[in-house]
Amino acid sequence: MKIHEFQAKQLFREAGVPVLEGVVARTAAEAKQAFEKLGQPLAVVKAQIHAGGRGKGHIADNPEQRGVVLVRSADEAEAAAAALLGKTLITIQTGPEGQTVNQVFVEQGCDIARELYMGIVLDRAAARPVLMVSTEGGVEIEKVAEETPELILKEHFDPAVGIEAFQVRKLCKKLGISGPAARSAGKFMAALCRFYVEKDCAMAEINPVVIDSEGRMLALDAKITFDDNALFRNKELLELRDLNEEDPAEVRAADSGLSYVKLDGNIACLVNGAGLAMSTMDIIKYHGGEPANFLDVGGGANTEQVTEAFRILLADPNCKAVLVNIFGGIARCTTIATALIEASKTVGFNVPLVVRLEGTEVEEGRQMLADSDVDVITAVDLTDAAKKVVAAIA
């Protein structure tokens, strides 16, 4: 689950991670009032969407308008907000379709001495969280990792202990941070690592984290993703979810216990198991097709879930064919066959349907489909299925 920058910074403030004062605004008039409330000669108006790269992003119908604007008066804050609110912001992370800006964050200015990068993710190979820092703050960290990986410094830490003082000293030395800034960095890093663990984050990223003229380390940005599977331990975080920022089909799928991610292709995939989903998408690409989605009905899918999955798939106007690839285990092939037959009655298939079944009760499932009046293209294996579904829309 993702949240907005202004929400993340409120959580940071409560956790002892230093941030600047800011006010969220949903109208241009509120942005003007926010500037006046902050009482500073300088402020920044930031578009709030669930995507990074806002500063370099642009409004769809106004390429000169950036998603982050420096303002020096209440009137400028009002004008900047008016140029952003209700508009589509396109960034490197949104794709060409962009996202609608429904709110802005008006934050006080800062006398920046240095910009750095800081982030925490889970290193699955090491089975520990890893704190990453870099001197290359304010730029795309993916580009830094690809072109100059040596500029990214890493320290793994025990989640039960947090980042230790010697690790902070090591990072500060490599970053060239000393004196009051080093003391501030120690408190900052410790608080951030503690927050990451306590809130079950999947990612906590600050780009840039800055050191101001007084030697204070501050989070000038905040991008947080929470582990959905652990939200039961921090149920209050669910109140921060913004459904306007999520794909309606993905929300609908999640409500039905399905894993769904929309993609840009035209061949829909219905599978059971994340690994099988990845393999299915790969082989579709290999044979010249483009997957329209990642949809995993899971190992214990029932007829209702599979029928709902078909409703979601067929509601996508880009869907030109559906590939069903099931390896029956807990979810038996007969269950999938029953769902296919029911979906044909309640939803109706108006695109080619290629089905590959294997595993538990596979013969019974195949026979059920053969005896039905559902128009199905059967496949003997995954390669056969991929070739047939690509050919069906050629």
Image (cartoon, grey):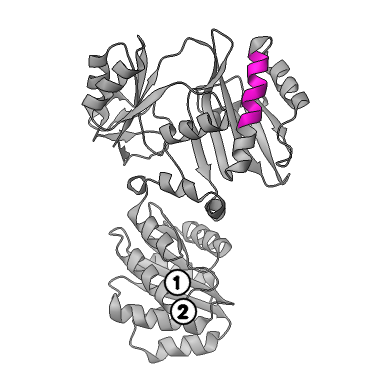
Q: Residue at x 40, y 39 (%)?
A: 50
Quick one: label 2, few (<14), some, or many (20+) residues within 10 Å?
A: many
Q: Horizontal placement of 288 versus 193: left or right?
A: left
Which numbered disc covers residue 391?
A: none
Closer to us: 296 or 232: 232
Quarter of the figure with residue 381: bottom right
Residue to which mark 1 is pinned: 324
The type of residue carrying mark 2 is Ile
Residue 40, horizontal then vertical, whole percent: 36, 11
The quadrant holding residue 71 is top left
- Element under disc 2: helix
Instruction: For the residues labelled 1 and 2, say whether their Cβ atoms are less than 8 Å apart.
Output: yes
Q: Is residue 189 magenta?
A: yes
Residue 59 x %, y %: 28, 30
Left/right of residue 272 with respect to residue 351 in the rendered view? right
**What is the magenta segment's predominant secondary structure?**
helix
Q: Residue at x 48, y 68 (%)?
A: 297
